[in-house]
Image: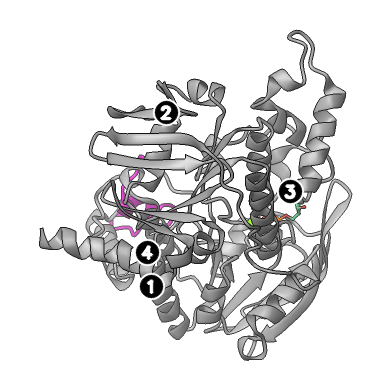
Amino acid sequence: MTALVKLEGLSKSFAGIRVLKDVDFDVQPGEVHALLGENGAGKSTLIKIIAGVHAPDGGVIRIGNEELKAITPHEAAKGGIATVYQELLLFPELTVAENVFLGHAPKTRLRTLDWSQMRRRARQLLDSLDSPDLDVDVKVGTLSVANRQRVEIAKALSQDAKVLIMDEPTAALADADVRRLMTVIKRLRERGVGIIYVSHKLPEIFELADRVTVLRDGALIGTRAIGDVTEQSLVAMMVGREIGQLFPKPEPQVGETLLKVSNLSFGDRVRDISFELKRGEILGVAGLVGSGRTELALTIFGITPATSGTIEIEGRAVTISTPKQARNLGIAYVPEDRGLQGLVKPMTIGQNISMAALHRITNGIFINFKAEAQRAADAISQLGIRARGPEQVVGQLSGGNQQKVVLGKWLETEPRILIMDEPTRGIDVGAKAEIHALMGRLAQKGMAILMISSELPEVLGMSDRVLVLHGGRLVTTIDRAHANPESVGAAMTRATLAQEAA
Ligand SMILES: Nc1ncnc2c1ncn2[C@@H]1O[C@H](COP(=O)(O)OP(=O)(O)OP(=O)(O)O)[C@@H](O)[C@H]1O
Ligand SMILES: [Mg+2]
């Protein structure tokens, strides 16, 4: 069978640094080919070359029988290559149908736009994607991430895509939406579409992929049939070494209560929640999407200040109505959505990291640039940020490495209480273990950590106790000895049943 797309000896450098070295890759009709590797390995760069965003420095691209040195976005579209990027590229002010057919709308015989056909075909495409509930006449700006992604996929299909590229499509999706996406991908594969799939979530890879290709530091480590690899062997290919324990959790030395929350509410999003967080403790927060996990963090941090209830820090009642007050009380918050809330992309790693703790490197008038560079260099090595150095602009880092910078920025404030929302989302397996080890060390040094996570293994592996939320309420608290997939899962779902019965 001829490959739909085939890359041979592909190379690419940015500013003299090689990020892809002599890479071969191909995708066949009717297969899911997963592309794996650590943060900064070159996955997104490879994809952008196929999509025509970046031109390679060397190598050959074959589309069907055509041989090209580089590919333009127009040639990519003509060749049936469609890409769903993580940062979705739709027009919020246009409707679903308009977005799907933008640039290739059906015309009437009078050469005017055929609106009814456009809406009808958009409807058919969305139905074929299991999305009968998605209205073709609403503006895309009002849709959830999952629905916007469906519109992107419908747009790709409307152009008769033969190759569909997806870069971390499930990173921001809830479980149920992930399941739906998996079904859609399998159906497209049956129709003969070739799918290039990037994800850090290995269970997804084993469910979907027919073949896997691993990149490390821009070099091709190997391409294998999925039946020939195990989770362990893939991890070893990715990181080039055995990684130790997946959740390295030192014995906690739990001290006195640092944070006490009583009957905390924010409208009907956070309802009457009470708990204590102790020095040296990692308190996990589990719950389904919409259970109020993030809202709880936002309320404690003063972004959506409490409408009732009290917060005490070290036994003293405090008022937190702004994030600034929270910071002054020694609370740091690493948000879930790092792209929007965490970073200034045109600024350097050093500037971003020092931003939250400026007082530490100034005398009030001048910034001590040497101190700034030193602290940034420390963060780079401590968090394993893959970068040229503290002076590199954050926007040039790979997705996962940008997330590590956000983490570094908040750790730099040396908080007493650290709230982390999805601390390892988009972070590769090796770096994940490093961040977990770091959390363990911080707790041992006496930091109190509130960790929100939708990954059950992470909650179970890292938490001393687990709070389970549902519908904005605290359903139960489970200690480490009794926390397992069954008990936590049951708490999350039994609550659902109880609520439905009520
Ligand atoms: N525009 C750019 N200018 C300079 N360097 C860049 C640019 N884009 C990417 N890089 C560098 O290329 C390397 C590969 O980045 P890429 O985004 O392809 O990684 P990735 O495998 O997708 O990682 P992640 O899993 O974190 O998304 C990184 O070292 C990154 O800093
Ligand atoms: Mg990437």
Q: Amino acid at mark 3?
A: Leu
Q: Tell me if residue 464 is in the magenta stretch.
A: no
Name the element at disc 2: strand
Q: Label 4 belongs to which residue?
A: 177
Chain part drawn in magenta: 92-110
* Label 3 vs 1, first from the N-terminus: 3
CA distance for labels 2 and 1: 33 Å
Q: Which mark is residue 383?
A: 3
**Left or right of 59, for residue 401:** left
Q: Which mark is residue 486?
A: 1
Closer to us: mark 3 or mark 1?
1
Residue 417 position in % (x across, y down): 55, 36
Tag 4–tag 3 contact (CB < 8 Å)? no
* Label 1 vs 4, first from the N-terminus: 4
Name the element at disc 3: helix
* Label 4 vs 2, first from the N-terminus: 4
Q: Amino acid at mark 1?
A: Glu
